[in-house]
Image (cartoon, helix red, strand yellow):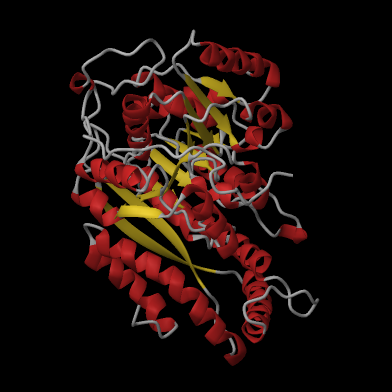
């Protein structure tokens, strides 16, 4: 067990100066040794990235960058690394990512900054000896800098934890998609002796977990200005403009009955929370809220009529390329969760019925195969990728021009991550197109209508905001008007 509370002065405090933020390698007077940080020649920092750096240094090397997906958080973190190397002779950069494919993606970016990263994930034998040797070389003075990129699951393992005590004081830890690190086991495993800390996330706030969110900010530091929103990113050219087409889908009769039952249980749980000052319920009649919301989100995500809507949409779009299809990660068939049910059905409709050239992209897809698929998708040899959640966080496939979102969870993070994926700039992309399938809740009785309105209000606010930022804002808002009228939410 690792202590959550850190004594004052457990780590050294560094005197950090506000950076004269260098925009390119040419600003440095000396060339660093191999593997030591150096600003990439190809990088030109935007104003908001420079301001974020300045504010992180002003906060004495702590803070969370809340910046829209695709706005350059990785580049900002590596620029901070270069500045720390200049100021205090930083010795180690430790990057922690939620997924294996993000490790390799970070590695590609690190190499542009003259770094030679150790990729510490999966088999201990493939990295532990290398890490031990490089940390020893660092202490002996025969090596100038060590870069380590690891995954959340490797971080909490004994093999990596045993190495952390050998990391020097001059270490920077970067938490990528840092909202994941607020989970108790992960947060407890973060190194307390490392004082320089940077969190990156478009959505650092954890869904229905205020305690985990606070633990994250306690460790890494608060959200720093400027927060960089989707509107900001589009205005400054960091993300492209887009067209937004909501597609309203009705539930089947059986799905409507299941939906109504879940909504009643959610209502009882919310009422219990109100009466008990927000405490989670512990009795059978007052079930915990989050699993109920997740169960209902899976029901909505796997709604059968979405397949009909997909068939109608793509029948007239058989020649389009660079399209991403986001599927549900579960269904409620016969009470069992089937994580590939909708994905297989979508692939069958697109590939089998419509002759659309697609491939699936899941957590089981190997890293090598993912790279092959990415290249085929970029070239247009593959017209589309059918994915579940593994393309949500951090994956950089800027060639995506169109997204068809069959499923989003109730978690706003997923909504934000997915739209950011599609809006990344690419030389061949003037703007993106997003088709968003939104399930219409069934007619509800008086007991549940108010619960539904409160739950729907937050979700609808996201849809409306996204519609308002689209190039076809008027058309998109009219489509959502039916949903607003149905539930008396015209004020959203």
Image-based side of 253 in relation to 204, left or right: right
Q: Residue furthest bottom?
A: 446
In the image: residue 331, left or right of residue 468: right
Outermost residue to the front: 9
The spot of residue 304 in percent (x, y) is: 58, 60
In the displayed orientation, state which residue is furthest to the top.
142
Q: Is residue 442 left or right of residue 461?
A: right
Q: Nearer the viewer, residue 301 or 119?
A: 119
**Residue found 63% across the figure and 29% down from its top:** 165
Q: Which of the pair 478/11 is nearer the observer?
A: 11
Give the left or right position of residue 204, taking residue 240 as reference.
right
Q: Please tell me whether residue 166 is drawn above or below residue 216 in the rendered image.
A: above
Point out residue 110 in the picture as x, y percentages from the top left corner. 40, 23
Using the image, determine if residue 46 lies above or below residue 368.
below
Vertical comparison of 291 with 322: above or below: below
Q: Residue at x 59, y 41 (%)?
A: 192
Q: Is 30 placed above or below 7 here?
A: above
Q: Position of residue 259 (x, y in %)?
A: 63, 73
From where the camera sits, is residue 133 visible? yes
Residue 208 visible to an observer of this rendering: no
């Amino acid at each position: 067990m690792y202590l959550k509370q850190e004594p004052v002065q457990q780590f050294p405090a560094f005197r950090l100066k506000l950076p004269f933020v260098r925009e390119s390698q040419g600003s440095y007077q000396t060339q660093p040794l191999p593997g030591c940080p150096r600003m990439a020649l190809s990088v030109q920092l935007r104003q908001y990235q420079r301001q974020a750096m300045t504010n992180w240094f002003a906060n004495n090397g702590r803070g969370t960058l809340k910046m829209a997906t695709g706005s350059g958080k990785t580049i900002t973190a590596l620029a901070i690394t270069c500045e720390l190397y200049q100021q205090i002779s930083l010795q180690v950069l430790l990057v922690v990512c939620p997924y294996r494919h993000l490790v390799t993606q970070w590695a590609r970016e690190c190499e542009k900054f003259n770094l030679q990263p150790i990729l510490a994930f999966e088999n201990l034998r493939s990295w532990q000896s290398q890490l031990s040797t490089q940390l020893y070389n660092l202490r002996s003075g025969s090596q100038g800098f060590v870069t380590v990129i690891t995954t959340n699951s490797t971080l909490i393992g004994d093999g990596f934890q045993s190495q952390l005590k050998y990391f020097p004081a001059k270490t920077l830890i970067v938490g990528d998609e840092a909202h994941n690190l607020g989970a108790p086991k992960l947060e407890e495993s973060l190194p307390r002796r490392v004082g320089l800390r940077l969190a990156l996330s478009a959505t650092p706030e954890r869904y229905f977990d205020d305690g985990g969110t606070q633990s994250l900010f306690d460790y890494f530091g608060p959200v720093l200005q400027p927060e960089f929103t989707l509107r900001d990113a589009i205005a400054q050219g960091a993300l492209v403009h887009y067209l937004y087409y909501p597609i309203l889908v009705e539930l089947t009769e059986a799905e409507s009955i299941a939906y109504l039952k879940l909504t009643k249980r959610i209502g009882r749980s919310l009422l219990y929370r109100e009466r008990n000052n927000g405490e989670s319920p512990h009795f059978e009649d007052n079930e915990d809220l989050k699993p109920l919301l997740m169960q209902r989100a899976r029901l909505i995500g796997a709604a059968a009529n979405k397949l009909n809507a997909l068939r109608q949409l793509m029948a007239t779009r058989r020649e389009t390329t660079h399209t991403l299809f986001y599927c549900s990660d579960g269904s409620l068939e016969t009470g069992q969760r089937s994580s590939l049910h909708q994905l297989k059905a979508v692939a069958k409709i697109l590939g089998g019925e419509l002759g659309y050239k697609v491939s699936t992209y899941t957590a089981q897809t190997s890293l090598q195969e993912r790279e092959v698929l990415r290249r085929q998708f970029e070239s247009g040899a593959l017209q589309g990728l059918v994915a579940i959640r593994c393309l949500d966080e951090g994956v950089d496939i800027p060639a995506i021009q169109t997204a068809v979102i069959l499923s989003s969870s109730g978690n706003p993070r997923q909504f934000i991550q997915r739209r950011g994926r599609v809006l990344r700039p690419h030389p061949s992309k003037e703007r993106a197109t997003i088709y968003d399938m939104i399930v219409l809740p069934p007619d509800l009785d008086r007991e549940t209508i108010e619960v539904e309105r409160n739950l729907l209000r937050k979700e609808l606010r996201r849809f409306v905001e996204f519609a308002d930022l689209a190039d076809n804002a008027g058309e998109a808002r009219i489509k959502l008007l039916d949903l607003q009228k149905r539930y008396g939410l015209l004020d959203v």
